[in-house]
Image (cartoon, grey):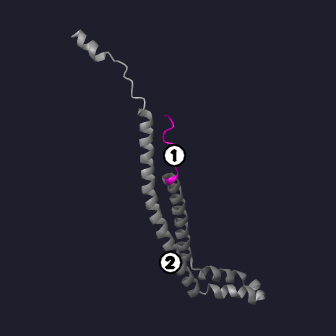
Amino acid sequence: MEQNHKKVFSFTQIDPPEDLLPRIITRIALLERRVARMRLSIFLGTTTLSLVAVVASFRYAWESFAQSSFSTYTSLLSSDGSALLLYWKEFLFSLVESLPIMSITVLLSTIFLLILSFKLMLHYLKDAYVSHQFNQFA
C-alpha cells in the first residue's frame, strides 16, 4: 500500500514540446483576428445604417426648421435692431420657443452614433487586417 502511495505522489518532470508556446500564441492570434473580423462586419453594417439615419434625420431637421418660424425670427436680427434692443427678452423667448429641439436632438444623436460606429469600425479594421508577428518565440 505504501508503494502505491509513492507511485501516485511521485511526480516526474514532463517537458512540453519545444513548439508548444509558439503554436498556442499563433492560435490565440488567429482567434483574435477572427473575432475582430466578425466585429468589423457588425460595425460596418452599423456605420452604414448610421449614415442612412444621419441623412434621414438631416432631412427631418431641415423640414422642421422650414416649418417653424425660427428663420423668420432670426431674419429680424438684421432688419430692426432698435426694436430688438427694446424687447430682447421676448425676442429670445420667441427664438427658443420656435426652435425645433426634437429634430436637433435626433440629428445630433445620429451624428454621435455615426462617429462612434465609424471609430469602432476603424479599430476593428486595424485589428483584423494589420499583420501581427505570430512567431515571436520561434
Q: Which residues are magenta?
A: 129-138
Residue 101 horizontal/vertical position (percent): 56, 76
Residue furthest to the bottom in view is 79
Q: Which residue appears at 52% of the width and 80% of the height?
A: 60
Q: How many marks?
A: 2
Residue furthest to the right in view is 82
Please determine whether, in this image, residue 9 is positioned above or below residue 60: above
Give the labeled residue for mark 2.
56
Occupied quadrant, residue 20: top left
Give the labeled residue for mark 1.
132
- Label 1 neighbourhood size at 10 Å, few (<14), some (14-19), many (20+)? few
Q: Which residue appears at 51% of the width and 60% of the height?
A: 121
93 or 38: nearer the eye? 38
Q: Secondary structure at mark 1?
A: loop
Residue furthest to the top in view is 2
Q: Secondary structure at mark 2?
A: helix
Considering only order in the chain, which callout, 2 or 1, is on the residue closer to the N terminus?
2
- What secondary structure is the stretch in magenta mostly built from? loop
Image mark for residue 90? none
Q: Which residue appears at 58% of the width and 83% of the height?
A: 65
Which of the image's four quarters has the N terminus? top left
Residue 127 horizontal/vertical position (percent): 50, 52
100 or 109: nearer the eye? 109
Q: Amino acid at mark 1?
A: His
Residue 107 horizontal/vertical position (percent): 54, 73
60 left or right of 96 in image: left
